Image: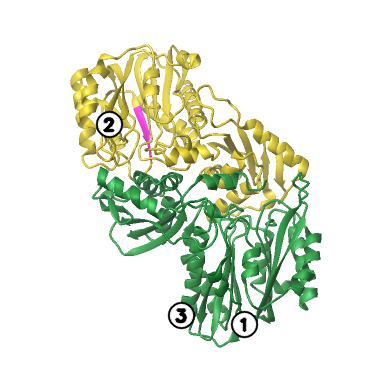
Chain colours: A yellow, B green
């Protein structure tokens, strides 16, 4: 945890806090109280330097709808976030959120519309607005400017450790927190990421950089393939430190997003192996991403890797399924596949023998993590699957996880 | 098993048989012999009445490549099938299969090219041609005309019961056998279906009917979303009975295919619940199928159903993910969702309370099968998820299974 603490210092111009609360969901027959965390990021002064990237899900939650609207605001003052309930598909859910933000504005000396709002958790349950409102005063009173760690911890659901990454930029810093997604994060696969910096960066540059980095980081991790109703990536600059070159900012943002994305995959109780599929060759952007994701999302590939079984035929199967269904013609003779750097398919055929089988099994075992192990830090090994399709130098890497008993258990019992 | 025996009588003009054999795969460091079943369907006389529908996987196995070629043959005489090894991605795999068929032709008094060949099993292993050739003589000697059950049993891999369906047509019968696919069939998701009939049916009508029925039966079951390198649906008529009307034939074929498709989903050790998603409304064919499959393939929906947890938010999530990614605009106010006939979402919002939650949990429990139970017959309950998207009467139903511990266990340990 020491490493986490070191990287969690807030950039200048920000304060944050978090408080727990309890409530009884009206949708669940239960006499046991549910716990929720409310957290707040507050800038000392409103800023016009902010941006956001959101889920493409056709049924986005109320927070996403609200935050998309906020992108047109002249300024923003902070972020209010809660876990446990996603506020999706709720009659009056938008009003619920706005009323909370209004109350928050009253306490913070600004307007409700100055805040982003982020929610993650069960879809179909209503926010306990009364209990949350009562928690706003202690939330504002608890604001401190030392560490972002309370927010990183408060937005966790079944995450097994808080995810924080930071990097120095020019005279300032860039700090980002995330909660996990998908396979590792059974909580409806929601991913929330908040990026905070004190380095001044023009709004247009910030937004372009954010989109560019999301495409190469969070959009390249793949877990169970579900894109949630609530996925949100927000970025805010307090602007109190001098700007750096656009490239330098983008580079820093990219580094932090890349590391957080890997943290998200690596997070989980359910993850035995982290898989990394690198696809090179002639396929263009979307086809290459689709093909790589088809391999990393195949339940048959995932379960084989979980079982340390180098059943490499399943890689060919998943890839061929995607390409065939998409109507993309690939000559199998132009295809090569390796696992852990060991070639298993080339010139249109597999090249396997019992010695290689032993090597591959050993490789998978070495790359694995006991899924019953929890906590931070996790190991940094990956199962590398390299695929060349046709001629060409285009390259994409996607990261994902295996499919374990623990995943099924977590997801079968998530709400109980 | 009595029900199975009753429906397994061969139509006239066919004989069949099966024999087991053992071999040592050269690709696997093991001193234990592997078992394979070889099976044969042989017509008394070559027929020009046959057809086939095959996987769209971009890297089809050698048997699929060979069988596609056979569609241009003037006549066909039978089917040679094996389990355990799929003969996919093997240098010389085509020659291996043709040499086996040549030997078979010698024994049966015809040519190798008069046979379809079907293989299912591990991808990347080479057929044990010598051991298989030695088994051809007992295979031909064992031919009998009573029952198709030996073939249905021989093509099983991890199937927990043989799948046979039959129906009377005109003065004859239609009998079909299948081996399972996907989630229920960890053996690389391969589905093999052989349809045999003695009713004469014009080649063109047979092929059109086969495509039509496949689209409405096997293409509407969805298991883990993997489409294998070997999926094959073959149909042969001995033509010894008088023809029936085209519609009547198609209706009979459709009934048998529909039942077999459901058998495939219902087959497995790994299946706790059979799920049925019916989507009605304004979406057109491919979009409707994609949306329904997105729900039935969502690991989050599957695991919730497995756990008897009516986490209906995950249905909205999976549907919205598909629609959003596909760029299809749907007003959530035009959407309604019910589970087991109980409405949970309409007019843009969920409608849940603790009483309904209890009802829904009870419904899921009732629909479940203890996944540790095996054998035949299985129960016939389904978890019904009904979705209305927009106005309209178009309707599609897809059938799939939940995601259980047993699925992971089977697939993690499949080859060991």
Which residue appears at 53% of the width and 78% of the height?
B205
Subunit ID for the residue under disc 1: B
Residue B193 in the image, given as x and y percentages of width and height: 58, 66
Residue B117 in the image, given as x and y percentages of width and height: 68, 66
Q: Which residues are magenta?
A: A51-55
Q: Are the residues at dot 3 and dot 2 in contact (C-beta closer than 8 Å)?
A: no
Assess disc 3: are there few (<14), some (14-19) or many (≥20) residues with their C-alpha within 10 Å of its C-alpha.
Answer: few
CA distance for labels 3 and 2? 59 Å
CA distance for labels 2 and 1? 73 Å
Look at the numbered disc 1 and give the secondary structure of its residue.
loop
Q: Vertically, is B395 above or below A236? A: below
Q: In this figure, which residue is indicated by the disc labeled 3?
A: B247
CA distance for labels 3 and 1? 22 Å
Q: Which residue is most to the front?
A: B2
| Residue A327 appears in the picture as rendered | no
Kindly report which numbered mark, 3 or 2, lies closer to the viewer in this rendering: 3
Kindly report which numbered mark, 3 or 1, lies closer to the viewer in this rendering: 1
Quadrant of the rendering where the C terminus of chain A is positioned:
top left
Q: Which residue is most to the bottom?
A: B242
Q: In this figure, which residue is indicated by the disc labeled 2?
A: A70
Subunit ID for the residue under disc 2: A
Q: Which mark is residue A257?
A: none
Q: Vertically, is A2 above or below A87? A: above
Q: Are the residues at dot 2 and dot 1 in contact (C-beta closer than 8 Å)?
A: no
Look at the numbered disc 3 and give the secondary structure of its residue.
helix
Q: In this figure, which residue is indicated by the disc labeled 1?
A: B12
């Amino acid at each position: 945890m020491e490493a986490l603490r070191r990287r969690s210092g807030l950039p200048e111009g920000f304060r944050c806090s978090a408080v727990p609360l309890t409530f009884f969901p009206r949708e669940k027959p239960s006499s046991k109280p549910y716990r929720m965390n409310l957290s707040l990021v507050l800038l000392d002064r409103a800023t016009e330097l902010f941006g956001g990237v959101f889920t493409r899900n056709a049924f986005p939650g109320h927070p996403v709808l609200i935050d998309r609207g906020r992108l047109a605001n002249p300024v923003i003052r902070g972020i209010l976030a809660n876990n446990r309930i996603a506020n999706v598909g709720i009659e009056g859910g938008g009003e619920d959120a706005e009323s909370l933000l209004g109350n928050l504005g009253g306490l913070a000396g600004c307007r409700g519309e100055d805040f982003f709002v982020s929610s993650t958790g069960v879809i179909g349950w209503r926010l306990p607005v009364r209990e949350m409102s009562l928690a706003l005063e202690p939330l504002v009173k608890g604001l401190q400017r030392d560490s972002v760690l309370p927010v990183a911890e408060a937005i966790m659901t079944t995450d097994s450790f808080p995810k924080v990454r930071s990097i120095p930029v020019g005279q300032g810093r860039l700090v980002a927190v995330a909660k996990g997604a998908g396979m590792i994060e059974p909580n409806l696969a929601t991913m929330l990421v908040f990026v905070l910096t004190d380095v001044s960066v023009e709004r247009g540059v910030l937004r372009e950089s954010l989109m560019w980095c999301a495409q190469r980081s969070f959009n390249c991790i793949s877990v169970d393939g579900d894109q949630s109703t609530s996925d949100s990536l927000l970025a805010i600059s307090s602007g109190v430190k001098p700007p750096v070159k656009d490239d330098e900012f983008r580079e820093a943002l990219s580094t932090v997003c890349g590391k957080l994305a890997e943290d998200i995959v690596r997070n989980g109780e359910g993850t035995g192996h982290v898989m990394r599929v690198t696809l090179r060759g002639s396929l263009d952007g979307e086809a290459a991403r689709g093909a790589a994701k088809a391999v990393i999302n195949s339940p048959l590939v995932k379960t084989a890797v979980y079982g340390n079984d180098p059943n490499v035929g399943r890689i060919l199967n998943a890839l061929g399924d995607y390409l065939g269904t998409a109507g993309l013609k690939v000559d199998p003779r132009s295809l090569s596949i390796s696992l852990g750097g060991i070639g298993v398919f080339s010139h249109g055929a597999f090249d396997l023998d019992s010695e290689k089988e032993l090597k591959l099994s050993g490789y998978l075992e070495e790359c694995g993590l006991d899924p019953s192990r929890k906590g931070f830090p996790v190991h940094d090994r990956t199962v590398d699957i390299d695929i060349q399709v046709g001629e060409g130098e285009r390259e994409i890497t996607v990261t994902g996880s295996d499919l374990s008993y623990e995943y099924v258990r977590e997801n079968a019992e998530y709400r109980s």
